[in-house]
Structures are given as structure tokens and as C-alpha cells.
Image (tube, rainbow, N blue to C red):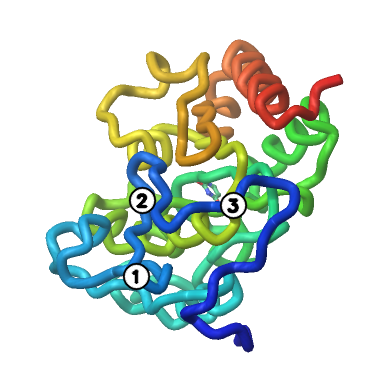
């Protein structure tokens, strides 16, 4: 557990502007109480009308991961082997957000370790010149839906405060969403990935770059992989990593 007081501000990050009390990223707005903590009260708009208990006020990613590891707020907890919270650099400038853990992820406790993850790792290496330890990877829901079905709206709503807090604590400059679920949640849109991708969107103090889910690229082949590559190049430019 962090020894920092839960009410104290996060340490200043010299590499980026000070983050303000309330992040304005669409869909992941973390409401703040006067002391700067995530508000998470019964009327918190993140919590879907106050029917879902808030995540306890986390001051660090490790605290949040610990809390998530025993989460039983939705029925997905009944089927999981373990919670797949997220992996990578807690100060990453780049964050990927996928949909939900699959079988491999449920067993290993890490996002994107199966076939989709192998493709993601390859595209990351080839287009961004990094491996996964240089970024942060998380999912919309942290527990595997049975039989790899789509996560349900109530499961997404229940898990949403975890993702919101992850984004707030990490403070990435660029969030790359992988597939429809993450994109629709974070951009608060019902439009599909085909019409939304191909550009970036303001997201809090940074940017959101929507791209396909790697599983879609594995199914569809070269053209989709090529579009994913161009989306990653867009992210690279926004990060200032292009020469
Ligand atoms: N698909 C996802 O969306 N997330 C994972 O972690 C693995 C596969």
C-alpha cells in the first residue's frame, strides 16, 4: 500500500503539465472531491445512477489493483480464475485499452497474452519501436466473460470506475482503444469503429486514437492490419515519438 496520504496531491510530473482536479476525458471523467480524491459518491455520474458502489479512493495503481483483485461487484467474478487488472509502466505516456480478458489472460493474469496479444506486441514493436513494458495495457472489464461472450452493459458500467481511475492515475498522453467496446465507452458514442477510426480525438489533456481490436485484424487480414499500423503511426506522432 502507498504510504502517501490519500488526500495529498500526486507528485508533480516534470514531463507533463500538472493534472487538474477533474479530468475532462469523455467517459472517464473522474469526479473529484475537494481534497482531490475521486469522488465516487452515490450520485457520481460514472456509477450509472448511483446503483453501483464506488471504487474505494485509490492513491496509487497498486492500491487499486489490490482492491480489484477481490472484486465481486458483478457476476463476472463468479467465473474468473483471477482479475486481469492491467500491465505495464504506471507512468506510461501511451495506454492501450482492450475489451475483456480471454482464456489465456484469465489463466495468466495479464492482458493480451494470447493470439491477439502477439499481434499487438508485433505491431507495437514494428510501428512504435517499443515493447509492452513501455506502455500500459488494460481492458474495459477486468474479468473474463464466460465463453468469451461480449461484456454486458451492467458489467461494463460496474467495472468502469476501475478503468477511469487507471487512466487518471497513469495520465497517458495518448490512449489507443482496441475495438468497439473501449472506443464506445471512452468516446461515449454509439458509432462503430469503421466510421470512427482514422483520426484522433481530444481526450482529457491528451488524445484518443481508436483502432481495431487485434482479434478483428486476425480474422480480417491484411487490410485491417494496415489500418491498425496507420493508427499506431498517428499515435506515435501525437506522442512526439516520430523523428
Ligand atoms: N482481448 C481483449 O480485449 N483483451 C485481452 O486482454 C485479450 C484479448
Picture disc at residue 29? 2
Please tell me whether residue 106 is drawn above or below residue 233 in the rendered image. below
Eye-nearest disc, 2 or 3: 3
Quadrant of the image containing the N terminus: bottom right
- Determine the secondary structure under disc 3: loop
Rendered image quadrant of residue 34: bottom left
- Determine the secondary structure under disc 2: loop
Cα distance in 3D space between marks 2 and 3:
16 Å
The structure residue drawn at horizontal position 55% and vertical position 79%, both measured from the top left corner, is 63
Count of marks placed on residues: 3
Quadrant of the image containing the C terminus: top right
The structure residue drawn at horizontal position 42% and vertical position 68%, both measured from the top left corner, is 36
The residue closer to the viewer here, 81 or 87, is: 87
The residue closer to the viewer here, 184 or 45, is: 45
Return the disc, 1 or 2, that comes first in the chain's sequence. Answer: 2
Question: Seen in the image, is 234 located left or right of residue 201?
Answer: right
Say if mark 3 contacts mark 1, CB within 8 Å: no
Rendered image quadrant of residue 146: bottom left
Tell me if residue 82 can be seen: no
Dot 2 surroundings within 10 Å: few (below 14), some, or many (20 or more)?
A: many
Please tell me whether residue 44 is drawn above or below residue 41 in the rendered image. above
Picture disc at residue 34? 1
Where is mark 3, residue-wise? Answer: 18
Cα distance in 3D space between marks 1 and 2:
15 Å
Question: Seen in the image, is 227 located left or right of residue 240?
Answer: left
Picture disc at residue 155? none
Return the disc, 2 or 3, that comes first in the chain's sequence. Answer: 3
Cα distance in 3D space between marks 3 and 1:
17 Å
Can you name the residue that lies furthest to the top here? 223
The residue closer to the viewer here, 214 or 46, is: 46
Q: Position of residue 5 (x, y in %)?
A: 54, 85
The structure residue drawn at horizontal position 53% and vertical position 77%, both measured from the top left corner, is 8
Amino acid at each position: 500500500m502507498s504510504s502517501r496520504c490519500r488526500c495529498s496531491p500526486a507528485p508533480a510530473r516534470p514531463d507533463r503539465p500538472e493534472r487538474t482536479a477533474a479530468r475532462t476525458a469523455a467517459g472517464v471523467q473522474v469526479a473529484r472531491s475537494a481534497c482531490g480524491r475521486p469522488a465516487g459518491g452515490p450520485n457520481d455520474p460514472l456509477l450509472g445512477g448511483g446503483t453501483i458502489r464506488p471504487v474505494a479512493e485509490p492513491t496509487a495503481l497498486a492500491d487499486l489493483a489490490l482492491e480489484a483483485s477481490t472484486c465481486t461487484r458483478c457476476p463476472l467474478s463468479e467465473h474468473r480464475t483471477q482479475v486481469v487488472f492491467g500491465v505495464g509502466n504506471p507512468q506510461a505516456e501511451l495506454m492501450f485499452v482492450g475489451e475483456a480478458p480471454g482464456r489465456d489472460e484469465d489463466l495468466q493474469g495479464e492482458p493480451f497474452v494470447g493470439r491477439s496479444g502477439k499481434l499487438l506486441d508485433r505491431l507495437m514493436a514494428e510501428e512504435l519501436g517499443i515493447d509492452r513494458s513501455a506502455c500500459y495495457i488494460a481492458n474495459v472489464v477486468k474479468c473474463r466473460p464466460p465463453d468469451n461472450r461480449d461484456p454486458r452493459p451492467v458489467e461494463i458500467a460496474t467495472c468502469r470506475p476501475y478503468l477511469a481511475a487507471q487512466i487518471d492515475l497513469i495520465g497517458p498522453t495518448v490512449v489507443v482503444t482496441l475495438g468497439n467496446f473501449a472506443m464506445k465507452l471512452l468516446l461515449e458514442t454509439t458509432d462503430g469503429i469503421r466510421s470512427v477510426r482514422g483520426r484522433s480525438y481530444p481526450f482529457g489533456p491528451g488524445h484518443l486514437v481508436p483502432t481495431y481490436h487485434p482479434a478483428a485484424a486476425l480474422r480480417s487480414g491484411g487490410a485491417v492490419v494496415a489500418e491498425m499500423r496507420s493508427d499506431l503511426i498517428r499515435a506515435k506522432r501525437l506522442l512526439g515519438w516520430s523523428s
